[in-house]
Amino acid sequence: MFLNRLHDGMRLQSDPTVVYAASDGAGVLDHRLTRAELETPSAYNTYVVTGLPPGPICAPGLGSIDAVLHPAASDDLYFVADGSGGHAFARTLPEHLRNVAHLRALTAAPAVAPALPAPGTPQ
């Protein structure tokens, strides 16, 4: 997907690079990314710069290195977390926006609290 974006001259628009920049290299934020952070100029902010960041944002694992050396054939240009630990990929922006809306609906759903027994009810 990233190789497709680079090939097409698109920005990578990858949240982890913005987190890296916004956290001064720590790679972790104590909040969700804000619109202001997505727009803040930085060589690592791939929402505002085209191409690769000037250096790595972490130490990649063997799986990541293998994926770059042997990329899967795909026309996908977008991805978002799918809420189950994986990702939902898309070829078009409308398809991607549907995937994002689905993820937001999952994350906005309130957790169901267990029912509490009535006072004085044996447990």
Image: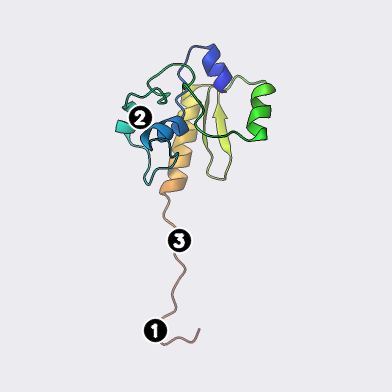
Q: Residues within 10 Å of mark 3 (few under 14, many from 20)?
A: few
Name above or below for residue 106 compared with residue 112.
above
In this view of the protein, which residue sits in the foreground, 34 or 112? 34
Say which quarter of the image contains residue 39: top left
Mark 3 or mark 1: name the one nearer the start of the chain. Answer: 3
Q: Secondary structure at mark 1?
A: loop
Name above or below for residue 2 compared with residue 62.
above
In this view of the protein, which residue sits in the foreground, 118 or 34? 34
- The residue drawn where x is 53% and y is 34% is 58
The answer to whether the residues at label 2 and label 3 have Cβ atoms under 8 Å apart is: no
Residue 108 in the figure: left or right of residue 40: right
In the rendered structure, which amino acid carries the disc numbered 2? Answer: Leu
Residue 73 at x, y percent in the picture: 67, 20
Residue 11 at x, y percent in the picture: 45, 19
**Which mark, by number, is residue 119?**
1
- The residue drawn where x is 58% and y is 18% is 3
Residue 72 in the figure: left or right of residue 44: right
In the rendered structure, which amino acid carries the disc numbered 3? Answer: Val
The residue to which callout 3 is attached is 112
Residue 12 at x, y percent in the picture: 48, 22
Mark 2 or mark 3: name the one nearer the start of the chain. Answer: 2
Q: Secondary structure at mark 3?
A: loop
Gap in angstroms between the C-alphas marked 1 and 2: 49 Å
Could you tell me if residue 101 is visible in this image? Answer: yes
Residue reaching furthest to the left:
36
The residue to which callout 2 is attached is 38
